[in-house]
């Protein structure tokens, strides 16, 4: 019988505070490459429990909107960052990343950490293109796969995580360019050679974590280990260029 819980459900029930690869160190490295000024508006899509959104609001003095389609993620994000949320320094919105109720060209920066592979990527990038101001920045951290990834293993990997696409670096570059996102930097990390950054996430466990989610966590660890030779991740820092010639 097919599992009724998704990988994202598991993260939400366990309350994994920093679920994206590279953790907060990778977030800091990437956002330091983006010219963020105080008061800029930033959308953090797929914000999870809101730690990146809180970092951008507190350390970059930006106006940040954390956006997630999972209601439990948003509930826990609001609880975890209650003081900043109450002071209107940080906002959390429960909505799908492909239909964000903001005006055209209303965002200076959009962040997406470990998000695009799980979505209808064309719908989300189309929405990001609509929301970004001319010259705005789009930063996406996502899985990249080796061209030699065996097809059967690749399909099993994608099915387990609910990923709708598994791309190489070149395929990500080509896709981003097709939405007028000019890749300025690509920060690649290889889990086979990159040292651990010591960033151990907190867990905000729900009171009623389903047994299936514990089993999924075990399978997740095995899945990562079995496919380390073919998977890594990269942070793509892009500048929106409406003058790009898209063929």
Image: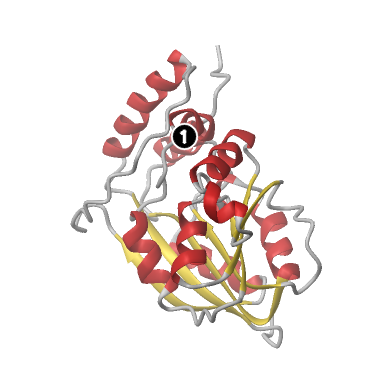
Instruction: State the residue in front, 27 or 193.
Output: 27
Disc 1 marks which residue?
Answer: 11
* Apparent side of residue 133 relative to residue 148 in the rendered image (left or right): right
* Apparent side of residue 192 relative to residue 102 in the rendered image (left or right): left
Q: Quadrant of the C terminus?
A: bottom right
Q: Position of residue 235 (x, y in %)?
A: 43, 65
Q: Is residue 31 visible?
A: yes
Q: Position of residue 190 (x, y in %)?
A: 28, 58
Q: What's the residue at 47%, 25% (across, down)? A: 206
Q: What's the residue at 37%, 31% (across, down)? A: 220
Q: How many marks?
A: 1
Q: What's the residue at 69%, 85% (across, down)? A: 245
Q: Secondary structure at mark 1?
A: helix
Q: Is residue 213 above or below residue 12?
A: above
Q: Position of residue 42 (x, y in %)?
A: 60, 67
Give residue 234's quadrant in the image. bottom left
Q: Is residue 78 above or below residue 86?
A: above
């Amino acid at each position: 019988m097919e599992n009724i819980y998704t990988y994202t459900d598991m993260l939400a029930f366990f309350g994994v505070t920093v679920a994206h690869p590279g953790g907060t160190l990778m977030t800091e490295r990437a956002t330091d490459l983006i010219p963020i000024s105080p008061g800029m508006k930033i959308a953090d899509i797929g914000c999870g429990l809101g730690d990146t959104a809180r970092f951008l609001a507190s350390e970059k003095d930006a106006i940040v909107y954390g956006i997630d389609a999972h209601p439990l993620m948003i509930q826990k994000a609001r609880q975890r960052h209650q003081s900043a949320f109450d002071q209107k320094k940080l906002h959390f919105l429960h909505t799908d990343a492909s239909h964000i109720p903001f005006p055209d060209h209303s965002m200076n920066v959009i962040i997406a950490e470990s998000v695009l592979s799980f979505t209808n990527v064309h719908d989300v990038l189309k929405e990001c293109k609509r929301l970004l101001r001319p010259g705005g920045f789009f930063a996406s951290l996502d899985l990249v796969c080796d061209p030699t990834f065996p097809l059967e293993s690749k399909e099993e990997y994608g099915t387990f995580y609910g990923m709708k696409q598994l791309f190489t670096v070149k395929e990500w570059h080509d896709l981003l360019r097709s939405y007028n996102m000019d890749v300025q930097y690509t920060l690649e990390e290889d889990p086979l050679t990159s040292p651990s950054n010591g960033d151990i996430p907190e867990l905000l466990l729900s009171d009623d974590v389903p047994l299936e989610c514990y089993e999924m966590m075990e399978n997740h660890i095995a899945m990562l280990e079995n496919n380390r030779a073919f998977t890594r991740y990269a942070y793509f820092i892009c500048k929106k260029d409406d003058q790009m010639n898209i063929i």
